[in-house]
């Protein structure tokens, strides 16, 4: 599994420096054509995928594609999508340019999702956690996101969001919901009522989003 393969990768690194010969995908680059670049990148990935004869899990197969961008073929490789923060700053662009940038980014994600089976999107923080222990807990301003890529289940205790993010409202004595998702669908597969200190099981391949329960407005 992804988590098991990554578990000891960080400790095995011989150097702290990584060199990436990346393909330019930059809305600021002169002559940049979003749709053409998306098609070029995704076509290379899907062509490589079609040539694979084994039945390795989608993400493990996809991880090998780093070599297309100058990296080395490895079960520990991954494809990094870099998108400059300035591209999503609405205050620096007129509405047309801003929408163009966001449309391009969304199209890239959708194209990969639809044409590369088994693809998994992680933040850099999640990737490092998965590499270190096989599962991750990502902290957002209003939620916690747990992902388990080990071959076995993990059990976690839900912390108070305020402990990890001081500006967030404390979850102590609050009603929370834990919603389960699979990597193959955006639809939830289960949901349960929880609270700070609750212990929940996360089966292999599942994502759990924990957030404050929404109060119905009458």
Image (tube, rainbow, N blue to C red):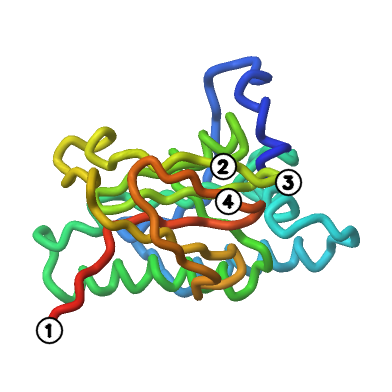
Circle 3/circle 4 CB separation < 8 Å: no
Residue sitting at 39 percent across and 54 percent down? 194
Q: What secondary structure is found at the residue carrying circle 3? A: loop
Question: Real-space Cα distance between discs 1 and 3?
Answer: 44 Å
Q: Which residue is mark 1?
A: 218
N-term-proximal mark, 2 vs 4: 2
From the viewer's perspective, is the residue at label 1 or at label 4 nearer?
1
Mark identifier at residue 89: none
N-term-proximal mark, 1 vs 2: 2
Q: What secondary structure is found at the residue carrying circle 1? A: loop
Q: Which residue is mark 2?
A: 155
Question: Real-space Cα distance between discs 2 and 4?
Answer: 6 Å
Instruction: Tell me residue 8's x, y (percent).
Output: 67, 25
Q: What secondary structure is found at the residue carrying circle 2? A: strand
Circle 2/circle 4 CB separation < 8 Å: yes
Q: Which residue is mark 3?
A: 151
């Amino acid at each position: 599994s992804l988590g098991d393969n990554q578990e000891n990768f960080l400790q095995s690194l011989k150097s702290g420096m990584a060199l990436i010969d990346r393909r330019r995908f930059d809305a600021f680059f002169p002559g940049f054509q979003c749709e053409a670049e998306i098609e070029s990148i995704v076509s290379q990935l899907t062509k490589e995928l079609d040539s694979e004869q084994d039945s390795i899990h989608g993400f493990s197969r996809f991880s090998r594609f780093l070599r297309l961008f100058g990296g080395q073929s490895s079960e520990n490789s991954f494809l990094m999508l870099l998108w400059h923060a300035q591209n999503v700053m609405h205050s620096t662009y007129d509405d047309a340019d801003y929408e163009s940038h966001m449309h391009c980014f969304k199209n890239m994600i959708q194209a990969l999702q639809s044409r590369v089976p088994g693809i998994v999107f992680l933040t850099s923080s999640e990737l490092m956690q998965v590499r270190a222990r096989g599962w991750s807990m990502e902290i957002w301003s209003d939620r916690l996101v747990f992902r388990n890529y080990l071959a076995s289940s993990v059990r976690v205790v839900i912390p108070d969001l305020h402990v990890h993010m001081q500006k967030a409202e404390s979850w102590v004595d609050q009603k929370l919901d834990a919603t389960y998702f699979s990597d193959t669908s955006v639809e939830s597969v289960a949901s349960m009522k929880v609270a700070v200190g609750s212990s929940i099981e996360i089966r292999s391949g599942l994502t759990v989003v924990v957030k404050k329960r929404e109060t119905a407005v009458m």
